[in-house]
Each structure stands twice: as C-alpha cells, then as structure tokens.
Image (cartoon, grey):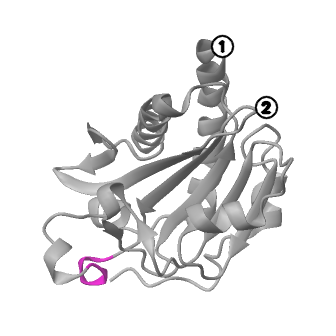
Amino acid sequence: MFPAEISDRLVAAELQGQLAAIIGREIIVLEQTGSTNDAILQVATANQKEGLVLFAEHQTAGRGQRGNRWESAAGKGLWFSMLLRPKIQVNDSGRLTIWAIEAISDIIRTEFSLEPAIKLPNDVQLYGRKVAGVLVEMRAQEKEPHIAIVGIGINVNQSREDFPNELQDRATSLAITLGRRVNRQEFAVALLRHLDRTYERFVTQAS
C-alpha cells in the first residue's frame, strides 16, 4: 500500500509559482470533477490564452480512447488537461498525442531511471502495463487557431489494490514499479516544464 500523505496535495499557487512559460501560466486544481477535458472548457473564457492547466484530485468520469473509462483513484495520480492553440488542422491532432506521450516517457525516464515504452496510439507502459494515457480533443475555430484540449492521466501512487480487478494485471503505477511513493507536486512541476520546453519545438515545427 502507498497511502496518500496529507501534505501530498496539488497546490495551484505553488505549482504556478515554479513555472514561467506557456504551459502552466495559469493553473487550476479541482477537488473533483467528471472529466478534466470537459471541466477546462467550462472554465476557459472565449479569448483564453493557451497554457491553462486544470488538475483534478479525483475524476469520476475520466475518458480514454474510443470511449473507454479511465480509472482515476482520488489523490493517487496526476489527472489534468491543458488548453492549447497550436496552428494545426483538426485532423492533425494525432501529432499532439505523439508529442504528449513522448514528453511523458522522457520525464519518467529522466526522473526515475525507468525505461517506459510507447504503445500507440496514446499509451505509455512500464513492463507491459499501462502507466499513462493521453486524450486529445480539438475544437475548430473560424478566425482563431483551433483549440486543442490535451488530457493526460498518469498513475503515480496507486497500489495494485487501487485498480479494479480486471485492470490489476494490465495497469501499473510509478510507485508500484519503484517500490516507493512519488511526490506528485514535484513530479507535476518537472512534467509541466518538460511539456512546455517540447511544446515550443512542436509549435515551431508546425508553423
């Protein structure tokens, strides 16, 4: 078991204070929501600048590819969505998915000396078990760059018992793999910084 510590809470002001770039320029942390992809559209304004990131400590209706449900144990993972405005066509959304899963893999490799594997179209695995997934949803805009919502779910501190029986042999977490808890706040900062650095290259290549 990897019990959540009281101090292991995501704090929006502390996260935002360690980020000075596009992604993470504004951060919201909700205690609970259905899906962070849906919630970020509800809170974003019409002229919202890209880079808003919305976390939820618990998702009750997290979504994966093809309508699959994403299990989001409260306080045990990183469940968040980013609002971006890349200058790409709606049918190019797969490029954003590849960018996100590569960035997740990179930071798992550098932060924890693990060797994740990418399973297309949108998963990251450790030793053949899913540890992270990405869901990109595009919204077409007539006169502005299209809106892209990049939803990310990463299993961080779950124990085997936190997964439903049918997923216990197919899913894993960083804590299970490492044999110890991970500080979610520190991991979130490292991940958002890396997403931001690599997003700048993505935008340049897309132009």
Eyeballing the image, is 206 above or below 119? above
Q: Picture coordinates of residue 106 (x, y %)?
A: 44, 35
Element under disc 2: loop
Q: Is residue 75 left or right of residue 167?
A: right
Whole-number angstrom distance, CA of label 2 to CA of label 1: 17 Å
Residue drawn at (26%, 49%) of the image: 125
Residue drawn at (63%, 40%) of the image: 140
Report which residue position mark 2 lands on: 143
Asked if residue 161 lies in the magenta stretch, the reply is yes
Eyeballing the image, is 99 above or below 155? above
Quadrant where the image shows the N terminus: bottom left
Q: Picture coordinates of residue 158 (x, y %)?
A: 36, 74
Report which residue position mark 1 lands on: 207
Discs 2, 1 touching: Cβ within 8 Å:
no
Dot 2 alpha-carbon crowd within 10 angstroms: few under 14, some 14 to 19, many 20 or more? few
Find the magenta span and give its range: 159-163
Q: Residue furthest front?
A: 142
Residue 178 shows in the view: no
Quadrant where the image shows the C terminus: top right
Q: Main secondary structure of the magenta part?
A: helix
Going by the numbered disc 1, the residue's amino acid type is Ser
Eyeballing the image, is 44 above or below 123? below
Q: Picture coordinates of residue 199 (x, y %)?
A: 62, 29
Which is more toward the observer, 39 or 131? 39
Element under disc 1: loop
Nearer the observer: mark 2 or 1; the answer is 2
Asked if residue 95 lies in the magenta stretch, the reply is no
